[in-house]
Amino acid sequence: MLPNEKRYEEFAYVLDFLSQGQSVVIKGREGSIVQAIGEERLTLLELLAADDQDFELGERLRIGREGRDKIMSVLGKLSYEELTQEAKSELPSVCEEIVKGNEPRYVAYFNELQPLTPRLHGLELIPGIGKTFMKTIVALREKQPFTSFEDIQNRVGLREPAKLVAKRITEEISGDSRINIFVKK
């Protein structure tokens, strides 16, 4: 991929659906508005739904240039503050769904994260991982890389790693973190 080439999300997950909504991105635009999060880049998006469509919260939609069926267009990016209350409350569970659905990608972080400063390791940014768990993870991954969340849970004793990663992603999206490891600014 070229450095300046734009990358677009192919899939997004529904955070909220407003059948008679007002666009936040394009002033004066009205219609069936979907607030969603992109699967690949974790971008908050505002989508214009095709007429007479219904959406489930957490539903995975095709939004790429090809093969859209329920979405007419991607109106643009949203900030966390622009999300509806419903979308904000749906975000943690949808993030967890994304993490579980892309398990190899997120397990790789446990195998690859490095120290950020002499005193802070990237793994410590994930909720529930302090110095002790971090040292255990680093020692065990050197012997054999982790293959799944279950593998991490069994070998390290860290409970529900997918939920912890999803919690971190939610913190990064909502702006509650100074350093991001999952969400590009």
Image (cartoon, rainbow, N blue to C red):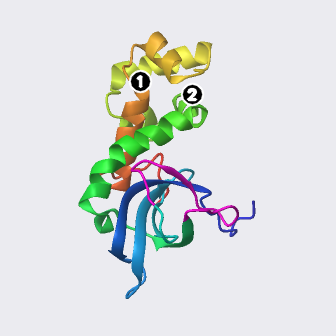
Q: Classify 62 as above or below 127.
A: below
Q: Classify 7 as above or below 181.
A: below
**Residue range corresponding to the magenta coloring:** 54-70
Magenta stretch: includes residue 59: yes
Tell me the residue that label 1 is attached to.
134
* Most distant residue in the front direction: 52
Residue at 61%, 12% (x, y): give it.
143
> Mark 1: which amino acid?
Met
Whether residue 119 is visible:
no
Give coordinates of residue 127: x percent, y percent.
33, 34
Which SS class for mark 2? helix
Residue at 58%, 32% (x, y): give it.
108
Q: Quadrant of residue 4?
A: bottom right
Give coordinates of residue 158: x percent, y percent.
38, 19
Residue at 47%, 68% (x, y): give it.
52
Q: Is residue 152 left or right of residue 7?
A: left
Q: Is residue 162 left or right of residue 104?
A: left
